[in-house]
Every structure is written in C-alpha cells, then in structure tokens.
Amino acid sequence: MQRVNNVNNLSVRDNGTGDLGRHYSINPWFLFVVVFLVLGIMLTERHLHPDPRVVQWSQRQYWRWVPVKAARGVIQDTRGIALVISETLPSFALDPRLITLEDMRTLQRVLSQDVLERVARAQETGKKFVWVERKTTPDVAERYLRLNLKAMDCREEPSRKYTNQQLMAHVLGFCNIDNRGQAGIEMAWDSTLYNPPGFRVVVRNPGKQAASITDEPVRQPHTAPVVTLTLDSRIQYIVEKHLYKAAQNNKAKWASAICMDPWTGAILAMASWPSYDPGDRRGVKPEAFTNNAISRGYEPGSTFKPIYMGIALDRGWVRTNEVFRCPARLKVADGYITEAYPVAMGNIDTAHLLVKSSNVGMAQIGVRAEKTKTYESLLAWGFGQEPDVELPAVARGIVPYPEQWRGVVPANIAIGQGLAVTPLQLITAGAAIVNGGRLMSPYIVKQASNSYGEVVYRGTPKVMREVLTPETAEWLRKAMRAVVVEGTGKRAATKVTKLAGKTGTAQVPEKGKYSRSRYVASFIGFWPFEAPKYLMLVVIGEPSTGRYYGGELAAPPFKDIVEEMSEVEYYTPAGKESA
C-alpha cells in the first residue's frame, strides 16, 4: 500500500539532494507579542524597582538636604556666667576665573602679597576658590564690601568669642580657624562642644531657584552644648590680678596660682603667667600658651616640708616632741645642707622645723627615712602621677627611683629638692592636710551636656586614698598656723581672717648644680583656720629683681588675694558632708 502525505499539515520540498526536508512556518505576530511582553516586564521592573543611583541622581534635580550650621557650645563658670560663646563673622573669598584686569588692579591695592600670589597660582591651575580673609572685623569687612567686586564672595562663619579676653585663658584654651579646639577646655571637650549641623529640605524649580519646604530645620540639635566649670569668675579675676601684678613687678619668668576647695577637690581658680587673649593670639610668644599650673614641673622647696613631715610622722621616723640640733650647715654624705639664712638655729622642736623652715633639721629626718617606703609614700600622695583633671597637657612631675637616692639625695628630698612637682600636684597634696588626711582627685568641670540637653559628665568629689591620719593632719595644721603667726609666713597674715600656710624658696637646678641666681618663690595656705573653706598656692618662678624668698615675694600677693576675696560673696563649697 502506498502512504499518502497530508499536505495541509506538512509542506514537503526537495532540498536539491534528492531528500525531502520539512519546513515549519512561524506566525510573525507571535514574535511581536513575545517582544512586547519582555519589554513590558523590563519597564515595569525599572519603574517599580529602579537603581538607587538613578533615584539619587534624579532627586538631586528637584530637592536636597542642605546643612544648617549650628553654633559651637558654651563654656560657663560655676555660677552660669558665659565665658566662651559663639558668634558669626564675615569671611571673604575670590573666584579667580571671574577676576578682570580692572579687578586685579583694585585687588593689588588692598590685598597682601601672599594672597595675590595664591590668586595668581589659582588662575594658572583653574582653581575656583581662594580665601582672602576669614573671620574679619566689621571695619575690614566694610572695606572689602566697598570694592563691589563680582569675583568676591562674602559668607558668614561661626567664630568663638571669649567674653573676658585674658581671664581664664589657659583653662579655656582656644580654637583654630575651623572652630576645632586646640588647647584647654576647648580641646579636652571638643567632641562635646562641637554642635553637629542640622539639615533643611530644599526643593528646586526648573529655574534653579531653591525654596525650603519646612519652616524649621530637621535633625537639628535641641540646644547648644554647655560645659560648666567649677571656677568662679569672681575669684579667678582677683587671683589673676594679684598674681600678674606680682609677676610683673618682680620680672618673673613665669608664675602660677590655684585656689581649691580642699574638701571636694573642686578648683575655684587657676591662673598662669604669662598670659594671652584667646580671641587674638597675634604676636603671642609660644611660652605664653603653657598652663604653668598643670604643665610646669619645678622643685617645690619648703612648701613640700609639711607633706614630708606628715609622711615621716605616720611612718614613725620622727616624733612630735623631738628636739633637733640645727647648725647653719650640715654635711650629709657627699654634700652639704645649709639653712636659707646662714645662721645656726640651735635646738628646736619638731613643729619649729616647719615654723622656722629649717633645712638642716628636715635633712636629719630625710637621712633616717627608708628610701623605698618614702618613694612609695610620695607616689601615694600623687607625685610622679598624672592628676585626673579634665584638661590636656597635664604633667606627671618627677620622683626619682629609690636606686637613684644616693649620697645627699635623701636629705634633698626632705627639703623639697631633687624632685619635680606641678602646682596642681602640690595643692592637691596640701588639701589632704586640710581635710584630715584624704587625697581628693582634683576636678575643674562641674557638668557637661551635649547638643540634645543630655548630661554626659558630672564632676563629683572623689577620694583617691587616705594618706594621713586625722591626728597627724591636725598637728600639721597647727604647725602651719604658727608659720604665719611667728614664722617665715608673717607677711601673709591678715586681719580679715585667720590663715595658716607655708613658705617656699627653691633654687633652680642648672647643668647638674643649683643656680645661685635662679629661684622659685611660693606660698601655700588655707583659711579660715578654724573651718577651712579655701586652699591656695601662689608660685613666682625665677624673679629677676633681687628678691626671691617665698615669704617676701609670694606671701604678700597671697594676703592681697585673701583680703579682696573677703569683700565678695563667698563661694559655697559642696560641703564637707558631700566629700
């Protein structure tokens, strides 16, 4: 039987080889539908789930987030008086591409050579922006505005205003041109004082004009950050006035003073000489930026004797009823210890070693002391350790290792030589004598809050350790009262209150020996004697007018400060109970 092909379902053709091939025809409308569906799916995908980069690019054509500058935080004293605030000042810049020949002639008359050179380099490289002068005074700003140059742009920039100029300069510190802290509180608390900018949503129409769609900034911090210090600006002003006067009158190389609440460790005033204006540092010598209260190491001399005596009494190396034979000069190992005035003091008791500030008598105690235990005690009192105060550039001081206490060194340590302390370390140790034996951690920041009003730090009294027995502390306070009544500190005595203290005169080491022309004079004292509220240290470094004894150089300004402070409302300390 012969097979018959169905020509309606299959077309057959000769492929030229004698074989029969099969050919299927596809409807073109089918292809069109497939392509249409694929394109539809792709378009739908692009519209519903576009590439994030495309979205960002398109949105920038219509709206954007514009940063809104926020002022840097406020620094204030313990009574809430603003010491540092923010203000805006005009700054001027040039677009070198827009400067005409006539503009250049005008600019050559008003700009410095340095700025003109920068403008010329910018024109060569095609740079679009050159600063002319930033944060100018109103007079300078008016001069630039009168030029009326199309190429010059004026913009407002935040700046720092130090409301009392030099007052507290070393504590407050300063900021650089970009408003970031470079010294003092401004540096130590830079991250807190920095106020992050807010943002405003801005839409742009086809004419490129921008308009805000909200009345208030979004993501704007609630308030300006605030750092509140323990310093009282009234006390600070008095301390600075008399310290600077004494330093200038005696042509001192440096000076420092600290006033502290001995019960809490809160610093009420901290001054350093030479000083400067944080808002205008032009022409200031580098040494003026040093905060001598925390960064200057010096040999304390006789102001160190009450501390050493306290260690010796509690260690049992001396008794309060002992009598010492004190010639004018005493040979100790490979050296000599001499009295400040080359006169023999004869036989004196333990208390009068402090009252008369006998070097020879204290040296005899130093020879008895055990080196290692003395070294450990000095560390326990905070010497050779960095105080935990909220400021940068705090020095550790120097306490030599016991292995270095050879020959006359133990006797030198007993009279406040052979080691280096900072004023902050010395007054912190002195507070332990006043408050009954507790070494308090000094602090200068009362409270700090961030840009959302949240308190991020609160300074509180902190007892580091007990370094004296209450009985020894009381005995030392009485001896220091006698120093002012009948001893070397008579010039600090005043009628407004009873005070107690200790004088100090130290030679400055120079090339392995003690200089005969460089001295440091100091006085440390507390008042009122019966119920102390204040402890203060005054240090005059390297005077050059011929006078250098602590009793004649540092005690008088101490007295002046106490008397003027009595005329103002007393600062109320945190209280003995809170300590």
Image: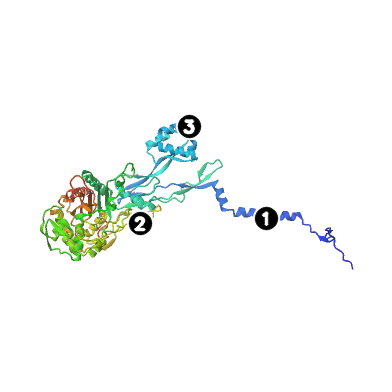
- Disc 3 marks which residue? 101
The disc label shown at residue 38, or none: 1
Mark 2 is surrounded, within 10 Å at the Cα level, by few (under 14), some (14 to 19) or many (20 or more) other residues, namely some
Q: Position of residue 404 (x, y in %)?
A: 24, 61
Asked which secondary structure carries label 3, the reply is helix
Left or right position of 12 against 154: right
Q: Amino acid at mark 1?
A: Val
The disc label shown at residue 457, or none: 2
Left or right position of 141 against 229: right
Q: Position of residue 329 (x, y in %)?
A: 13, 56
The vertical placement of 242 against 116, above or below, is below
Q: Residue at x 39, y 41 (%)?
A: 135
Q: Position of residue 174 (x, y in %)?
A: 35, 47
Mark closer to the observer (1, 3): 3
Q: CA distance from mark 1 to mark 2?
A: 63 Å
Q: CA distance from mark 3 to mark 2?
A: 57 Å
